[in-house]
């Protein structure tokens, strides 16, 4: 962390256990990302309720190249929030989930769905429920009747245009999720 964490307590004097837990949680944050530039933590004790004292924890973490991670935990009258340690852990758990999301975004690890490949039916195996698709780069990809969606296997002819997902099978490349498309889709 580029700057030391800023920790504030409002309306109560924290125990050594609360201070130690916050220090432990800040160190835990740093294990999730070395890019954290600052961390601000505020723990407040709310006015006395019928059940006891409730704690409010706010955490703000700055990450370069991303908006700040902000957790502002105020839990109404939930009994577990009567314990400062539980309230602190809950707030930091939420902050870590947000940091993990932010780090995936920064690394551009958002899952991308690949565009299905396309090709034309090149040939069928005589007496079999399978055939081969020729791709634009000249490769032949095996496919089976069961991989043709919507029961369209019987509509296929040599030269039919299809989109498919390629995967590696026991004997090499094969097509799964084969979908018949019209002639206007491929040039």
Image (cartoon, grey):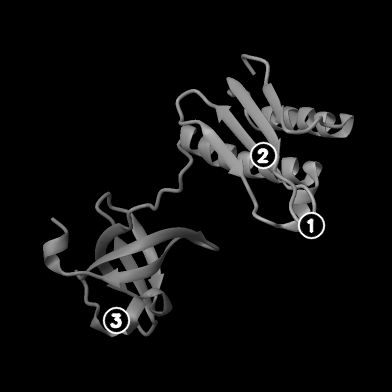
Residue at image position (22%, 77%) is 157
Of marks 1 and 3, the one in the foreground: 1
For disc 1, the neighbor class at 10 Å (few under 14, some 14 to 19, many from 20) is few
Secondary element type, mark 2: strand
On the image, which quarter does residue 183 sit in?
Answer: bottom left
Classify the position of the C terminus by image quarter: bottom left
For disc 3, the neighbor class at 10 Å (few under 14, some 14 to 19, many from 20) is some
Kindly report the distance in space between the C-alpha atoms of the residues bearing marks 2 and 1: 19 Å
**Residue pointed to by mark 1:** 51
The total of numbered circles placed on residues is 3
**Residue pointed to by mark 3:** 152
Secondary element type, mark 3: helix
Pick the residue in front: 59 or 177. Answer: 59
Q: Would you say 98 lies left or right of 116 here?
A: right
Tell me where residue 89 appears, x and y as whole percent: 74, 42
Tell me where residue 42 appears, x and y as whole percent: 66, 31
Of marks 2 and 1, the one in the foreground: 1
Pick the residue in front: 113 or 140. Answer: 113
The reply to whether discs 1 and 3 touch (Cβ–Cβ < 8 Å) is: no
Q: Is residue 154 above or below residue 66?
A: below
Of marks 2 and 3, the one in the foreground: 2
Tell me where residue 105 appears, x and y as whole percent: 47, 37
Q: Would you say 15 lies left or right of 156 here?
A: right
Q: Earlier in the sequence, mark 2 or mark 3?
A: 2
Q: Earlier in the sequence, mark 1 or mark 3?
A: 1
Q: Is residue 95 above or below residue 30?
A: below
Q: Earlier in the sequence, mark 2 or mark 1?
A: 1
For disc 2, the neighbor class at 10 Å (few under 14, some 14 to 19, many from 20) is many
**Residue pointed to by mark 2:** 57
Residue at image position (58%, 20%) is 37
């Amino acid at each position: 962390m580029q700057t030391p964490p800023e920790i504030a307590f409002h309306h109560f004097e924290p125990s050594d256990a609360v201070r130690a837990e916050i220090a432990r949680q800040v160190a835990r944050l740093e294990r999730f990302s070395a890019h954290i530039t600052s961390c601000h933590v505020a723990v407040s004790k709310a006015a006395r309720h019928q059940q006891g004292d409730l704690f409010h924890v706010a955490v703000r973490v700055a990450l370069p190249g991303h908006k700040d991670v902000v957790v502002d935990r105020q839990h109404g009258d939930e009994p577990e929030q009567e314990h400062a340690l539980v309230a602190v852990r809950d707030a930091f758990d939420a902050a870590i989930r947000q940091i993990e999301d932010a780090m995936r975004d920064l690394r551009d690890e958002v899952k991308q769905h690949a565009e299905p490949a396309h090709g034309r039916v090149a040939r069928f195996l005589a007496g079999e429920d399978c055939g081969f698709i020729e791709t634009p780069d000249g490769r032949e990809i095996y496919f089976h009747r069961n991989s043709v969606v919507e029961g369209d296997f019987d509509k296929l002819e040599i030269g039919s245009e299809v989109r498919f997902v390629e995967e590696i099978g026991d004997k090499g490349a094969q097509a799964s999720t084969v979908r018949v498309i019209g002639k206007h889709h491929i040039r």
